[in-house]
Image: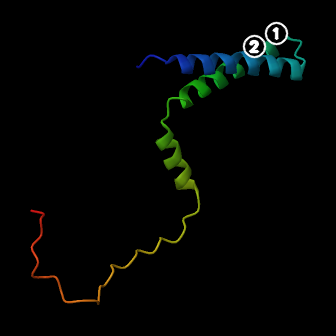
Amino acid sequence: MPRPTPAQLAYGSATVVLSTLAMLLLSEARSGVSVVIIAAAGLLLGVLVAVTTTIPLTARAKARSRTTVRTAPATVPRPRVHSSGPSRVSEHSLRR
């Protein structure tokens, strides 16, 4: 299992502390059981945030594109036809 990066540790820790504090203040929990449940919910939320920071941006974009509505494919431009002058078939190419 790879070690967490400093960004993961920072985001996860901040999420645990801030979300737990906010839930405790908003719920006005008084019993020990409710405090433990809120602390566990904050910890789970922090782990979720830390894990999702490891997903590369391209994978997130692909996941989003799967859920979006498919649009009609773009039209492919036609090759240009040069009608002016003689055909250049007899000319040699510099490419090999």
Q: Nearer the viewer, residue 32 or 21?
A: 21
Classify mark 1: helix, strand or loop.
helix
Marking on residue 83: none
Res. 15 image quadrant: top right
Is the residue marked by circle 1 packed among few (<14), some (14-19), or many (20+) residues within 10 Å?
Answer: few
The amino acid type of the residue labelled 1 equals Gly
Is the residue marked by circle 2 packed among few (<14), some (14-19), or many (20+) residues within 10 Å?
Answer: few
In the picture, the quarter occupied by the C terminus is bottom left
**Image position, residue 54 (x, y; %):** 50, 29
Q: Nearer the viewer, residue 96 or 54?
A: 96
Q: Is residue 16 above or below residue 86?
A: above
Q: Residue furthest front?
A: 85
Q: CA distance from mark 1 to mark 2?
A: 6 Å
Q: Nearer the viewer, residue 24 or 75?
A: 75
**Image position, residue 84 (x, y; %):** 28, 89
In the picture, the quarter occupied by the N terminus is top left
The residue located at (53%, 54%) in the rendering is: 65
The residue located at (49%, 18%) in the rendering is: 5
> Residue at label 1?
32
Marking on residue 36: 2
Res. 14 image quadrant: top right
The residue located at (80%, 16%) in the rendering is: 21
Left or right of 78 on screen, residue 8: right
Disc 1 + disc 2, Cβ < 8 Å: yes
Left or right of 4 on screen, residue 44: right
Classify mark 2: helix, strand or loop.
helix
The amino acid type of the residue labelled 2 equals Val
**Image position, residue 91 (x, y; %):** 11, 78
Res. 20 image quadrant: top right
